[in-house]
Amino acid sequence: MRERIIAGNWKMNTLPEEGAELAHEVAKAVKDIDNVKIVICPPATHLCHISNAIKGSNVGLGAQNVHWEEKGAFTGEVSTSMLKALGCQWVIIGHSERRQMFGETDEGVNKRLRHIVKSNIRPIVCIGETLEERQAGDTFKVLERQIRIGFEGVEMSGNSGVVIAYEPVWAIGTGLTATPEQAQEAHHFIRELLSEMYGSENAAATVIQYGGSMNEKNADVLMSCEDVDGGLIGGASLKPESFAAIVNASSMI
Ligand code: 13P
């Protein structure tokens, strides 16, 4: 059976002390769950605080972005070894907000991913179509481009730890969730493509999360889809009871 992974992307929210409190609450609420991997991804400024707040718990720590070099003249960037030094085991890359507002490209995702897979840190690679792309019937074309370019030259095996998050851009922060049929169709397409690129065994072992207005009310139906293996949660990850309810729902499927 594939792993199940629920990750909270806090985006640019909370101050460090509040974040530590939130992390503490989350850890308390999910302490008995052992069949779902639980991750929180706070802003980079909070990593040290939160690493301490979740020490000894079953909650893992992730960052929201990382550079593809280890050090050098890259103002404003952080490296995988810096993240690891603070206890991060995970990092999100290619989020649509970074693509749309900060000029990130499939090629940039590829550079990051090539570096991260050698770094003993697990990437969560975000992909997803905009509303215009969906309405134009281009969803699969967009997902295929994002994966083919993003994964170019990346070796992947069943235990490489790469996670993909399918996040339809039109569902992010809008309260509009993909229907289970839409999610399953996209996830199935992604898995078929991975199968063509990496073989069916590797594709079958790869975790594909859904993201986009996932909450405690819709988590169980989305998680019941055959190819949905987890969630990347934005807004609802800022409320410990909602995030814990999503984790709980996922643990029961
Ligand atoms: P929301 O859950 O707020 O829609 O955000 C999803 C997301 O972007 C997670 O990365």
Image (spheres, helix red, strand yellow):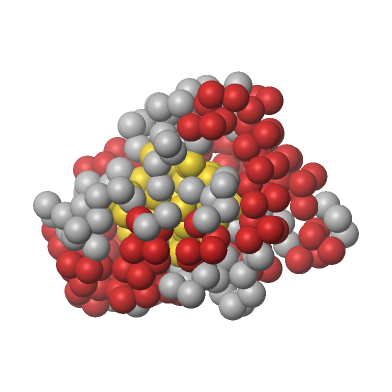
Instruction: Determine if residue 42 is in view.
Output: no
Q: Quadrant of the N terminus?
A: top left
User: Looking at the picture, does residue 63 appear above or below residue 120?
Assistant: below
Q: Nearer the viewer, residue 112 or 57?
A: 57
Residue shown at 64%/52% (left/top)?
184
Q: Position of residue 104 (x, y in %)?
A: 61, 51
Q: Residue furthest right?
A: 136
Q: Position of residue 82 (x, y in %)?
A: 28, 44
Q: Nearer the viewer, residue 103 or 245?
A: 245
Residue shown at 24%/63% (left/top)?
30
Instruction: Determine if residue 124 is in view.
Output: yes
Quadrant position of residue 245: bottom left
User: Looking at the picture, does residue 148 appear above or below residue 168?
Assistant: above
- In the displayed structure, does residue 38 sit left or right of residue 100? left
Q: Position of residue 201 (x, y in %)?
A: 53, 24
User: Looking at the picture, does residue 69 appear above or below residue 101?
Assistant: above
Q: Nearer the viewer, residue 77 or 45?
A: 45
- In the displayed structure, does residue 78 sit left or right of residue 102? left
Residue shown at 77%/46% (left/top)?
140
**How many callouts does the rendering have?**
0
- In the displayed structure, does residue 112 sit left or right of residue 238? right
Q: Position of residue 117 (x, y in %)?
A: 43, 30
- In the displayed structure, does residue 111 sit left or right of residue 49? right
Q: Nearer the viewer, residue 127 or 180?
A: 180
Q: Quadrant of the C terminus?
A: bottom left
Residue shown at 35%/56% (left/top)?
251
